[in-house]
Amino acid sequence: MTVPDAPEQQPTPEMDPTVRAAAEAARGFMPPDEGLALFRAGVEASAAVPGAPLLEVGSYCGKSSVYLGAAAREGGTVLIAIDHHRGSEENQPGWEWHEPDLVDPAVGRMDTLPVFRRTVHDAGLEPNVVALVGDSPTVAGFWTTPCALVFIDGGHGEEPADQDYRLWTPHVAPAGLLAIHDVFPDPADGGRPPYERIYLPALASGRFEEVSATGSLRVLRRMP
């Protein structure tokens, strides 16, 4: 009896050390292990859906954009980084994650765009990262391009999470990936909306299957 050959194992993609150092030094809230998992998901998605862009909802100061921008460069595509750059609810004054030095004194509101641009520049990824400045529902209303990967890390309240799930998951191409940040099955670990309003509905829809979990990052594949 002939024993079939085992499937060829694909090498784990390695992030450029200089770009990785830039990502880890960038301002933001993503731990290195989750960032590397996001990078690898981006590389995998680019290979599965060649030529399609990667897209993230919620860029803040660009930390995740460096990980995904590096993946886009590896895959010969681009990252579309969507953010209004006024900070989500947890970034506002009086909240735990507010950073006062990111407030524009001229208008009295958060403005993370200058820091984002500097982060992407310093990582050498400007050719691969396209900043799209606007709120998620407005941009989604005009978006028509299938994406190799959609990474949702926008507003963490119930309404923003509902909107991001409803508006962006249909744009994940078949065999593409949906990545979700801050997924906490245990309420003691963090807020619930990304888990309850994005992760669980995606699995329940029958359109996605989970492929990896790293910290609070979940990666799901769109079924063919």
Image (cartoon, rainbow, N blue to C red):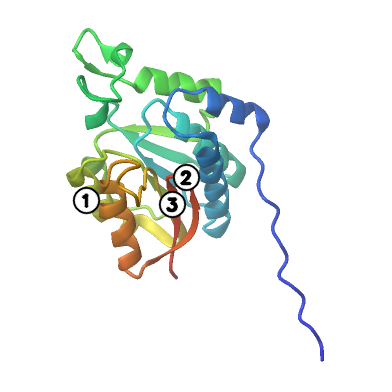
For mark 1, what is the residue?
A: 162
Left or right relative to 182: residue 32 = right
> Which residue lies most toward the bottom here?
1
Whether 68 is drawn above or below 141: the answer is: above
Residue 85 figure quarter = top left
Rate crowding at label 1 as few (under 14), some (14 to 19) or many (20 or more) other CA atoms within 10 Å.
some
How far is disc 3 from disc 2 in space, using C-alphas? 8 Å
For mark 2, what is the residue?
A: 215
> Which residue lies most toward the top here?
106
Residue at screen point 27% across, 47% down: 192
> Which residue lies most toward the front here?
188
For mark 3, what is the residue?
A: 218
Left or right relative to 120: residue 89 = left
Whether 213 is drawn above or below 107: the answer is: below
Whether 141 is drawn above or below 91: the answer is: below
Rate crowding at label 2 as few (under 14), some (14 to 19) or many (20 or more) other CA atoms within 10 Å.
some
State which quarter of the image contains the C terminus. bottom left
What is the three-letter code of the residue carrying label 2?
Answer: Gly
